Amino acid sequence: KEKIQVTKQILILGNNTYANAYKLSMLKFGYKAEVLEGFEHWPKISTALKDMDAVVVITSHISHDNMWRIKKEVLDIPVIYSSFDGANRILEQLLAMEQEPQDEKVAT
């Protein structure tokens, strides 16, 4: 058995129903994922953002207020705005982000 080394922590804001799929898919590539409903209250999301290396926003499952707050307030970590909610597609977007310069945000 091969031991997986966790190298990054990500926050996925979307449908909590898919939390296990997200966590397992991301872990295979060294990402420890925390999943929150996109409709949570902002203080909970804001607290969860601390110490994250990236944020994935599932655009079809987040409140408008939370999405705009992320766009305005989350400036120090990469944010992926994904129209997909499947774990494999999100993983592809994260891996693509790793290939781009670190100081850019990715919007898809």
Image: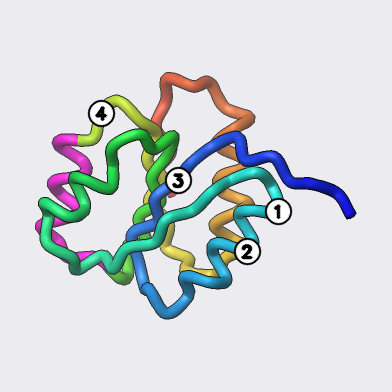
Q: Which of marks 4 and 2 is nearer the N terminus?
A: 2
Q: What stretch is highlighted in magenta?
A: 62-73
Q: Is residue 70 magenta?
A: yes
Q: Earlier in the sequence, mark 1 or mark 3?
A: 3
**Residue at x-position 62% and y-position 40%:** 6
Displayed quadrant of residue 94: top right
Q: Is residue 93 magenta?
A: no
* Residue marked by disc 3: 10
C-alpha span from label 4 to label 1:
27 Å
* Residue marked by disc 4: 75
* Residue marked by disc 1: 28
Coordinates of residue 51 in the picture (x, y in percent): 35, 34
Residue type (three-letter) at the residue carrying disc 3: Ile
Element type at marker 1?
A: loop
* Residue marked by disc 2: 24
As drawn, is 20 to the left or to the right of 34? right
